[in-house]
Amino acid sequence: MRLRIPEDDDECDAGSIEEQAPFLLPSTIKDEPVYLKPSLWTIDSHAIPIFYLLLGFLQSYPRVALRQFTMQDLHASPALQQIMLSVIMVLPWQFKVLYGFLSDAFPIYGQHRKPYMLLGVAIYSLSWICLGIFSAVHPTVGTTCFLLFTGTFGLIFTDVMSDTLVVERMKAEVGTDIGSMQTLCWCMRFIGNLVGLVIGGIQISEAGTTPSTIFLTNGLVPLMVLPSLLYLKDEGNQEHKENNDDNDGNDGKGTATALSSASSKLWAVWDVMAEPWLFRPMLFVFVNAATPSSSDAFVNFMLLPTDKDGLGISMGEYSVLLAIGQVASIAGACLYQWVFSGVQWRTFFYVVMFISLPISLTQLIVIFKMNEQWGVSSFAFLFGSEVVGDTMGFLIQMPILIMSAKLSPKNIEGTVYALQVSTNNIGGSVSGQLGALLTQYYDVTSEHLGNLWKLTLVCIALGMLPMLFVPCLPEHAEHKVKGVRSHGARLLLFGVLVGSLVLNTLSSIVELVEWGGGLPSNSSGTRLVVDSVTVYNATSVNMLLNGHANESAVNGTVNGFVLL
């Protein structure tokens, strides 16, 4: 795909194209200057898809070993295990917007992403190497919690930088090519997740590898990508480059200039939040993620033994369902890019949401165990519904990811993209809380599953509410929603984001301080099963393999997705 440099009478000039898509490669064909859209597999960009593969691997590889370590070496109760793995390792996710703003406002040697990416890799590797050493010599709960926190911080810091690098390069995509880079990166991420899950599980269960060895290996693996990162092209802001040159040798003036630039970027973010082309799509993203989900209740119903009116799905079978969900997500991402990328977004969302309704209703077939009357086992039925449900789920997520990237203005891409992604994640938190309230209202417990079908039906019905907000979306990736600037919408958006951030952080701190006694509520606030180990295994395995503690329901499907 090529972009022609416009003539003098066109609406924009060549300079504007370079400003919007700085990673286009100049070339000449038949003596006409053209710009060729770059590939992520070039020498200056190949580190990005490699990192996404690594990110997926790192999220799943140490999980089985970490579970064994906390149970057998630290002798941690299920309550303490949940605190360590579902609170400590999740807290750094709450501050993605701050990471993005830091890289936008404070470049290092004129580069906004690459230095912070290297710093994040270094923090992650050092944390896990230390955990490998301390876990073998003198394992303690305090040291483990601290190193898990710093390791996650380093990983998320690097993740935000890589997301922003993709967003910057996506400005070069036009037409049906829009989203191809994100599709590649998400597929690489899912593949890495599967590879890490298989290798980590085999090493623990078959090879007898010790957790400390796996932790040490997990810390060394990221160092393998450092040569690729050194070649990474980071297009720094020209304004910062000039300021750095002017202030070379004048620390006082340089500090003042840096603070002034940071202040201007902060005001730029504040100003853009009032634009209808930003806050209206964000409203849809929030509502779509915030609809209540019955996934926690349904997962625990799956894992309950048959003598307690559950489905009797084993942890091994559940892991298979999670793995096939990852494969189905890859299929959904590729299917959107190859087949549906040219469809108008509003039409696409209406159709997919409508089709998702009967797919979601298949949960009722399993709840009433009608499939057994048809001679189909619960595992086989869930296997099929998982494939279809997760494929449809990521069909919804891909245009949201693309939209978030295309709506991120130049020079503040990191902050605005992280802001939009955080809106989805915060909506997932609200979804969990609403699901918990409905679960309590219908009195769904391990001893009383009679109302599970009512809970599921209500959540499916409420999952159709986002259809009312589809008009808030642009028609396609190169279109912006028109309307009037709204200061009230900006204040509401700011209040929801900051309020949710504060509440999530405070709730995490409270759980850390008060982990004694029984099992605390999981991240979505749901207490379901008396057997705390079953609850912990069911929810945390699902959450950790998806890379975050909060699930965001997608039209009532069994598993939600979180935008990392």
Image (cartoon, grey):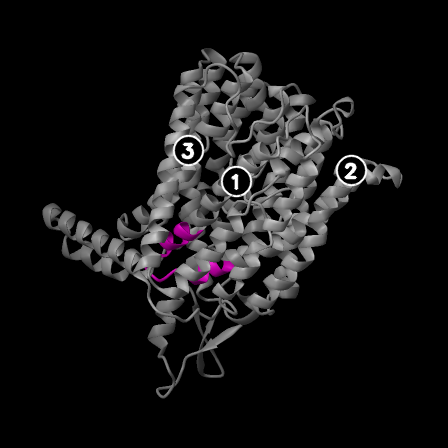
Magenta stretch secondary structure, dominant: helix
CB under 8 Å between callouts 3 and 2?
A: no
Tell me where residue 119 sits by quadrant: top left
Residue 248 image point, x, y percent:
15, 51
Residue 134 is left or right of residue 342, and the answer is: left
- Residue 91: numbered disc: 3
Name the N-terminal-most of marks 1 and 3.
3
Q: Residues within 10 Å of mark 1 (few under 14, many from 20)?
A: many
Pointer 1 residue: 434
- Work out whether residue 523 can be spotted: yes
Residue 563 is left or right of residue 366, and the answer is: left
The secondary structure type at the circle numbered 3 is: helix
The secondary structure type at the circle numbered 2 is: loop
At label 3, the amino acid type is Leu
Picture layout, residue 255 above or below residue 86: below
Looking at the image, which residue is at 70% across and 28% down?
Answer: 303
Stretch in magenta:
402-420
Name the N-terminal-most of marks 3 and 2.
3
Pointer 2 residue: 368
CB under 8 Å between callouts 1 and 2?
A: no
